[in-house]
């Protein structure tokens, strides 16, 4: 991809957009960074970009017409329905994204992970496996670090491990990971994709360009994911926690087993894993499959699996206070993620849920609430939707909070020794917070300072 002297419009002035603007200016392009809003940034980031030669168009988009730009780069958080994207497509101007842009400047083999739930944990675990094996590894993408900011620092002997979202994959055209992983597919982001077929199509772009010699790792236990294997031109490796497979990664008698090429090898016991829950066992199986085909030996694999403690905001243990354990699962941003979180614990749960709905149905979550939850605390735009779904299942122990601090305090007051207070909102954070990280960090702060919060 030749960028020198090209005029490029970067749509969306978030973390990804800033990284892209900086990158393409270094490549000799003329960059225009546009955003419908006027974002505020710390540390004079915009001033630095302007000093590098980036033009700003904040608070509105510039006109896009034939000849005005050579390329439009969309940030993943901005839908392709916005005016500059539509106008570019109408006028024959190529539209791409940061993931595709980074791919064109990458020498290293890529292991890319997608799925509705578990992406961040699995990405971090795969990265740790490679790093513990002594391989120079970049871990980035949707996990927080834009790939385009770092890819050129890594060579063909290194590995790039990338979490990729459906939003990023929408604009991928030639992106081709050496190993692709699809963990699961359940309804999410339907407010953006419109329907499940479009959502599945976006996820499937992770392996659309793969060839013989590439690998796609799929969840055998998830029907929507498993059936994608028939469409792969690379080699399909299945993983399953429920069934012993002829070829793949699975569980037998409490052991994680790899069987590739007819030879079965035990990696470690499932009780050796440090991350809780059946869904994290699935994440571990996927990580074993993705790294085993890249040549990681069993001993190194087992050591990392035993030592990996998980990631922040995903079933993160915060504290135990007066016999109550507080768990931060702020990254549980859809009902299926929160169902998996509830299933990870046997103790009575006080659940904090609610936020911005992404087009989700809360009926299955309500069934699990009836089964696992002692007290439900709801808040945010989806509070009444979740409460109504729970009441429809004859669950009545529901408290409504006016704000996030009140929600945590109500949960704390309702909890008894031996209970778990679980923040797993089943919703996005955007009605109250910039992102799920900010939400999780506030939860952590309130819990760790709960005495002073009670007094105030």
Image (cartoon, rainbow, N blue to C red):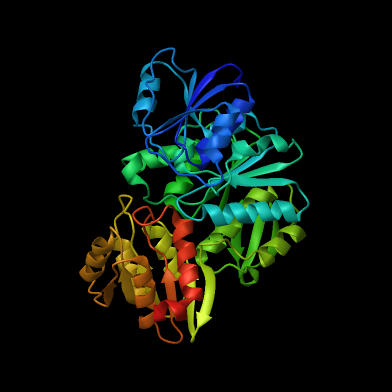
The answer to which of 121 and 11 lies nearer the viewer is: 11
Identify the image quadrant of the C terminus.
bottom left
The x, y position of residue 391, in whole percent, is 22, 70
Total label count? 0
Residue at 52% across / 80% down in the picture? 320
Can residue 147 be spotted in the picture?
yes
The x, y position of residue 205, in whole percent, is 49, 36
The x, y position of residue 247, in whole percent, is 61, 51
Can residue 246 be spotted in the picture?
no
Residue at 46% across / 47% down in the picture? 225
The answer to which of 396 and 241 lies nearer the viewer is: 396
**In the displayed structure, would residue 388 be above or below residue 164?**
below
> Would residue 233 appear left or right of 344 to someone viewing this image?
right
Identify the image quadrant of the N terminus.
top right
The x, y position of residue 207, in whole percent, is 54, 37
* Quarter of image, res 258: bottom right
Residue at 63% across / 24% down in the picture? 27
**In the displayed structure, would residue 313 be above or below residue 127?**
below
């Amino acid at each position: 991809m030749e960028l020198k002297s090209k005029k490029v419009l970067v749509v969306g002035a978030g973390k990804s957009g800033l990284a892209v603007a900086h990158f393409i200016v270094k490549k000799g392009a003329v960059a225009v960074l546009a955003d419908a809003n006027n974002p505020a940034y710390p540390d004079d980031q915009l001033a630095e970009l302007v000093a590098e030669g980036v033009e700003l168009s904040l608070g509105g988009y510039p006109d896009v017409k034939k000849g005005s730009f050579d390329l439009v780069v969309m940030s993943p958080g901005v839908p392709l329905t916005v005016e500059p994207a539509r106008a570019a497509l109408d006028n024959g101007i190529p539209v791409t994204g940061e993931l595709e842009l980074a791919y064109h400047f990458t020498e290293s083999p890529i292991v890319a992970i997608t799925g509705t739930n578990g992406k961040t944990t699995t990405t971090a675990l795969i990265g740790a496996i490679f790093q513990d094996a002594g391989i120079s590894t970049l871990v980035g993408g949707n996990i927080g670090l834009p790939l385009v900011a770092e890819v050129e620092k890594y060579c063909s002997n290194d590995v790039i491990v990338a979490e990729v979202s459906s939003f990023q994959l929408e604009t991928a055209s030639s992106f081709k990971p050496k190993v692709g992983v699809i963990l699961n597919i359940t309804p999410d982001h339907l407010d953006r994709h419109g329907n499940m077929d479009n959502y599945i199509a976006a996820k499937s772009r992770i392996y659309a360009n793969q060839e013989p010699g590439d690998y796609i790792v799929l969840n055998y236990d998830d029907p929507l994911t498993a059936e994608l294997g028939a469409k792969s031109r690379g080699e399909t490796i299945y993983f399953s926690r429920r069934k012993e497979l002829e070829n793949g990664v699975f569980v037998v008698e409490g052991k994680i087993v790899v069987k590739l090429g007819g030879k079965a090898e035990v990696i470690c016991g499932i009780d050796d894993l440090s991350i809780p829950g059946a869904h994290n066992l699935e994440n571990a199986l996927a990580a074993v499959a993705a790294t085993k085909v890249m040549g990681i030996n069993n001993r190194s694999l087992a050591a990392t699996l035993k030592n990996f403690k998980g990631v922040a905001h995903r079933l993160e243990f915060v504290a135990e206070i007066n016999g109550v354990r507080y768990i931060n699962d702020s990254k549980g941003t859809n009902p299926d993620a929160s169902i998996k979180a509830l299933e990870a614990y046997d103790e009575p749960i006080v659940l904090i849920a609610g936020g911005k709905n992404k087009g989700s149905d809360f009926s299955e979550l309500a069934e699990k609430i009836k089964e696992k939850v002692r007290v439900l605390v709801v808040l945010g735009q989806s509070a009444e939707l979740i409460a109504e779904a729970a009441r429809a299942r004859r669950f009545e122990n529901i408290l409504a909070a006016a704000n996030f601090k009140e929600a945590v305090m109500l949960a704390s007051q309702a909890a008894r020794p031996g209970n778990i207070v679980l923040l797993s909102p089943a919703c996005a954070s955007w009605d109250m917070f910039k992102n799920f990280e900010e939400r999780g960090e506030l939860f952590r702060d309130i819990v760790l300072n709960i005495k002073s919060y009670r007094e105030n």
